[in-house]
């Protein structure tokens, strides 16, 4: 059976196997299972840091599984794994379904994992049906999407898109707080040494030119409250908000906590605390987000006022321009706070900003968005409610995803499904097997529709 | 020559050798020399963490030096080293001069070190003069006074005073932030394992009953601005302010920084930042101090809102009661802040306090204070100003010292000298050789006066 021979009704009737998808997903979560939050066998979070031993095991499983599904598997210099089920035409790139198998140190079972598993499930359905696509269908596992272990998120799709230099990515050092986990080595690894260690430093140059794609579809949990609170089933993702990541140093002066009056201090931690409080006020006033996830105070002694504080800083906004405005405001505000702390001794604190990552707002491709929209409407028709189309909405992504980088080179779109309480990056992150299957069915149909669109 | 045969004028004329004291002090700072701040050979701070390899070397030197000065040296189970120059009477305890040779990770050359070196210089002057005391004269090096590596300050004088159980002290684990220094092992040491490692787990039970003292005098830099800004030379320390150390946990919820609106967060770090800001306001309103020196945020990922923050908390006040009041106020305030953060999701942050160390305000012994006062007035007479006594003042110590614990068992007092900018716990901590010698001469005379007072 060829995709191009299917009727519109036949495409709309395509569904994944809900139970098989759930089973495969939780099977793959045996590697790196994290904090337990309930009594059920799958009631744990995940702690599968990129390129850890657990990550190696799930990668090995991914390759074995896709090879058994007759895929050709390649690994590139960033450890990205591309599994391609050949189509009828050998001269065109495959349409990809992709996401990531790494997680946050206290992450859940759906962020990234569902996206890759929906790709595997799509391949299984196609095999089962004997469906032949015109172009190939690929599934990609991108390395270190989370940026949790190596502190640039989506770094490997970024290298693939030639937006991040390979050398910079290879040289990234693991974050100390994360490195202290048992999954990390005693001496900090670089991304390259970690790739070598688990034997996933592949031979293929990491580039969209070496591993081309016709399109990239990514299924993901929403990680926000909109779908779940509105009782909607599918989000058709049309855009991704802008964000920037910074490393900020606040430099004050070490001094004794017991003998130094407040007016004689240049307390870098106190100044940082005021900055964190102010950052939320300023970001909120612009409808933006500002967050600190990592903080380190030196010298780190109970009775010494910290003379140096470093913290990560994450600003997000619906529009690229807004990030710039919030940054500019906060640079002024932080300088004012620093100038006040230590003025009594004529040695006020100083602030230094370093931009680590800049992700402008992204608009996805109209062709992909249309395929997702049509597929979503077809799948939610199962719900058997009067206006089933109202269960589908367009939505903007708050988080970055590998699709941000693929969208720079090939048509891309994403599919969101609801998750409990809008919660993610947390062990209790949860989506029902029903919602996961709905999302995967949308992916399946979207890939078929895109294949038909290309070769109509 | 016997101390009891000296005239009052002869006692008042006793002086240490300024150049020898300075030379010995800087010689001992070759072990653990820290951050360089100037061009001079002695223009560095110190980084000599308790029981590090550097600490072992200076301990070995201390024992060799005092043994050469005919002292009998003993080491107790906490690694405290007691060097006693015998007096004429064998049936009475010695009068001690003591302080500590360990430093903060970014400490200076005077805090603690000057106190021990003034003891050695006192012994040298006595030897030179052929002065025989009635009771013996001892010099003690207390282990881990700073509490920087093992997070209880004055822990070993605390065990000696039987105020801290030996088992608790031996079980203390080194602080992770400090353990990351090159001086520490890759796996955290306990205090006991660290003592064993450098062979300073002595055979003598650590107790004031096993190693009794007649009195304890301690010379220290002020670590505050009063003497230096008033142009005064000696502080006669009559009391030590009260303080408490806490470990505070703020428990919120991990969640994604990019997709979680502020009102949906239970951001443990944001709540902690507000607490730190409020703590200063509340402490200041009571004329007290409140400080955070150590902070850790988990899971420690750029794009995850921290769900757990732990920080050290240090409250100080002139009176014990005031510490209690500030603590009570802040417990309420912190609870209010925690309750606000996360209320939007019905899962507000929580705060947990653990008291790690409680040091009530201390009044020193009148006999010791008088010896110090008389000695100080005699030494500053050198200044040749009309009212030289005005160069001496009574003063309260803001910091804790080993003398806090000795004062619980034996008559104790301290001597302060000025330090540059009132700065300490900082590499640039500095006192002139002149001021150091003034302080050491006060120690020398105070010990002689106390000996005479005992056997008059």
Image: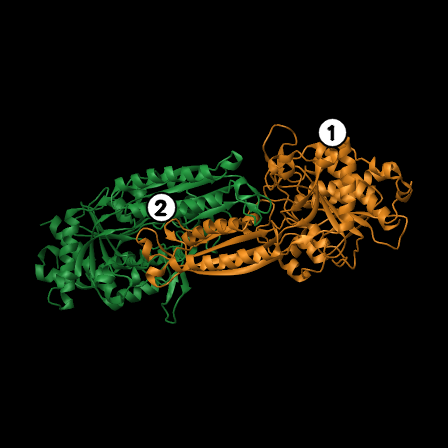
Chain colours: A orange, B green
Q: Nearer the viewer, mark 1 or mark 2?
A: 1
Among the 4 quarters of the image, the one containing residue B225:
bottom left
Quarter of the image where the N terminus of chain B is located: bottom left
Instruction: Tell me: B86 left or right of B36.
Output: left
Q: Is residue A365 visible?
A: yes
Percent across and percent down for residue B65 are 30, 59
- Hey, which quadrant is residue B126 in on the image? bottom left
The answer to the question of whether label 1 and label 2 lie on touching residues, with beta carbons closer than 8 A, is no
Closest to the observer: A260 or B404? A260
Q: Residue furthest bottom?
A: B39
- What is the x, y in percent for residue B159? 32, 42
- For label 2, the residue is B314
Residue A117's tag is none
Tell whether A276 sits left or right of B113: right
Could you give the CA–CA distance between mark 1 and mark 2, rounded to whole angstroms?
A: 61 Å
Asked whether the residues under marks 1 and 2 belong to the same chain, the reply is no
Specify the farthest residue to the front.
Answer: A386
**Residue B20 % position (x, y):** 26, 67
Look at the numbered disc 2 and give the secondary structure of its residue: strand
- Please name the residue shown 56% across and 52% down the image: A314
Few, some or many residues within 10 Å of mark 2 (<14, 14–19, 20+): many
- Mark 1 neighbour class, 10 Å CA radius: few under 14, some 14 to 19, many 20 or more: few
Q: For this rendering, which residue is in front, A269 or B22?
A: A269
Above or below for B63 versus A22: below
Q: Is residue B297 left or right of residue A72?
A: left
> B235 or B91: which is nearer to us?
B235
- The part of the image, by quadrant, that contains residue B420 is bottom left
Q: Which residue is mark 1?
A: A385
Query: Label 2 marks which chain's residue?
Result: B
Q: In terms of secondary structure, where does tag 1 sit?
A: loop
């Amino acid at each position: 059976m060829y995709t191009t021979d299917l009727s519109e009704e036949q495409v709309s009737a395509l569904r994944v196997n809900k139970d098989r998808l759930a089973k495969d997903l939780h099977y793959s979560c045996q590697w790196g299972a994290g904090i337990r939050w309930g009594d059920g066998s799958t009631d744990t979070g995940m702690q599968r840091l990129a390129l850890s031993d657990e990550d190696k095991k799930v990668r090995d499983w991914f390759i074995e599984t896709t090879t058994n599904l007759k895929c050709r598997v390649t690994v590139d210099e960033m450890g990205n794994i591309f599994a391609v089920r050949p189509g009828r035409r050998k001269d065109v790139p495959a349409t990809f379904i992709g996401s990531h198998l790494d997680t946050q140190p206290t992450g859940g079972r759906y962020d990234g994992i569902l996206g890759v598993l929906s790709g595997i499930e799509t391949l299984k359905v196609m095999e089962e049906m004997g469906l032949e696509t015109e172009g190939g269908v690929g599934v990609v596992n991108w390395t270190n999407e989370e940026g949790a272990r190596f502190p640039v998120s989506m770094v490997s799709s970024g290298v693939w898109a030639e937006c991040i230099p390979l050398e910079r990515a290879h040289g990234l050092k693991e974050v100390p707080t994360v490195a202290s986990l048992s999954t990390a080595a005693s001496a900090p690894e670089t991304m390259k040494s970690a790739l070598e260690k688990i034997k996933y430093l592949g031979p293929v140059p990491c580039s969209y030119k070496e591993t081309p794609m016709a399109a990239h579809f990514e299924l993901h949990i929403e990680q926000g409250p909109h779908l779940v609170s509105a009782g909607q089933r599918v989000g058709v993702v049309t855009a991704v908000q802008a964000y920037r990541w910074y490393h900020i140093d606040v430099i004050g002066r070490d001094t004794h906590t017991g003998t130094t009056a407040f007016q004689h201090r240049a307390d870098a931690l106190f100044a940082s605390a005021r900055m964190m409080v102010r950052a939320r006020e300023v970001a909120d006033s612009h409808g933006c987000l500002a967050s600190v996830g990592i903080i380190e105070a030196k010298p780190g002694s109970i009775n010494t006022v910290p003379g140096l504080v470093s913290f990560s800083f994450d600003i997000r906004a619906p529009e690229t321009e807004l990030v710039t405005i919030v940054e500019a405001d906060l640079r002024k505000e932080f300088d004012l706070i620093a100038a006040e702390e230590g003025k009594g001794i004529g040695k006020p604190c100083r602030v230094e900003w370093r931009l680590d990552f800049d992700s402008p707002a992204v608009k996805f491709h109209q062709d992909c968005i249309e395929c997702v929209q049509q597929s979503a409407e077809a799948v939610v028709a199962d719900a058997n409610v009067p206006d089933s189309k109202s269960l589908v909405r367009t939505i903007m992504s708050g988080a970055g995803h590998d699709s941000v980088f693929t969208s720079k080179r090939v048509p891309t779109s994403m599919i969101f499904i609801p998750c409990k309480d809008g919660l993610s990056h947390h062990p209790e992150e949860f989506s029902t097997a029903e919602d996961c299957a709905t999302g995967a069915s949308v992916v399946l149909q979207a890939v078929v529709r895109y294949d038909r669109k290309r070769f109509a």
